Image (cartoon, rainbow, N blue to C red):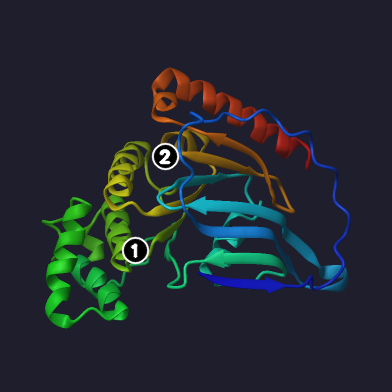
Amino acid sequence: MTSTATEPLAPEPPTAPEPPTAPRTTTAPDQPAPRPVVVLDGLGKTFGSGQSQNTVLEDVDLTLGQGEFVALLGASGCGTSTLLNLIAGLEAPSKGAMEIPSDGVAFMFQDANLFPWLTAQGNVELALELRGVPKAERKTKAEALLALVHLQHAGKKRPHELSGGMRQRVALARSLAQDKHVLLMDEPFAALDAITRDLLHEELTRIWRHTGRTIVFVTHNVREAVRLGQRVLLLSSRPGKVIREWRIDDAQKQPEQAALLADEMTAALRQEISRHV
């Protein structure tokens, strides 16, 4: 694990007091806690200085366990993308400490960002090449990863020949090709239609269970968070911090229970948004 710690850039303006902590939904107490792979302690991020200072994240405490699927939920602009950037090392924290895997993390964005001149298989092989996989092994590994996302017959197609959902599957295979323990996903299905999104929810759940990756999934869709997450964390509006957590077992993902949880999360999200209108 690597660890970083920094001091505040400048004194931060006072923020409104936090609302009382709401009751949490928990899993059975006999489930062992997974081994921590990412630990954030008092993490904060401020952009600018002086009168233009903008605190996006403040006092974020978060532990991600090996093999967990954690969904981050919040209003638009609450700092979820900034939080992923900090974990990925794309931004430096302004204060606090963090521990992340020494080999880094994989990142999947909202847009597939495939290289248009490469085939689907070529895009996956490029990630393997950058990882240092010998040329003789890349074809076989890329084919296996495309098969994992059910695209074994589309390896020779270029991005413009694929549907939006298929392009996102290629992007997922490319992320898995990086072979990191932690996969960060920033609203990867937001631009897809409802039917395609539902199909990819099933695929992602299957792949997560198959690979044992730790996944951090940013979404503004409450039902998506309930369907995918083992834990759902609600971030406050700026400055963002974790203010609510739900733990969800498989029984709670059944339609009736999932609908009740989604309603509860929606009410909490609306309450947080109303505090900052």
Q: Secondary structure at mark 1?
A: helix
> Which quadrant would residue 106 be assigned to in this image?
bottom left
Label 2 crowd bin: few (<14), some (14–19), many (20+), radius 10 Å: many
Q: Quadrant of the C terminus?
A: top right
Q: Is residue 64 above or below residue 267?
A: below
Q: Which residue is mark 1?
A: 175
Q: Position of residue 195 (x, y in %)?
A: 32, 36
> Which quadrant would residue 244 be assigned to in this image?
top right
The front one of 241 and 118 is 241
**Residue visible at 82% across and 69% down?**
52
Q: Is residue 55 above or below residue 123?
A: above
**Residue visible at 39% across and 61% down?**
181
Q: Which residue is mark 2?
A: 228
Q: Amino acid at mark 1?
A: Ser
Cα–Cα span, label 2 and label 1: 18 Å
Q: Which mark is residue 254?
A: none
Q: Position of residue 140 (x, y in %)?
A: 12, 68
> Which quadrant would residue 50 be assigned to in this image?
bottom right
Q: Position of residue 77 (x, y in %)?
A: 65, 53
Judged left or right of residue 52, residue 106 is: left
| Residue 157 seen in the figure | no
Q: Is residue 73 above or below residue 142?
A: above
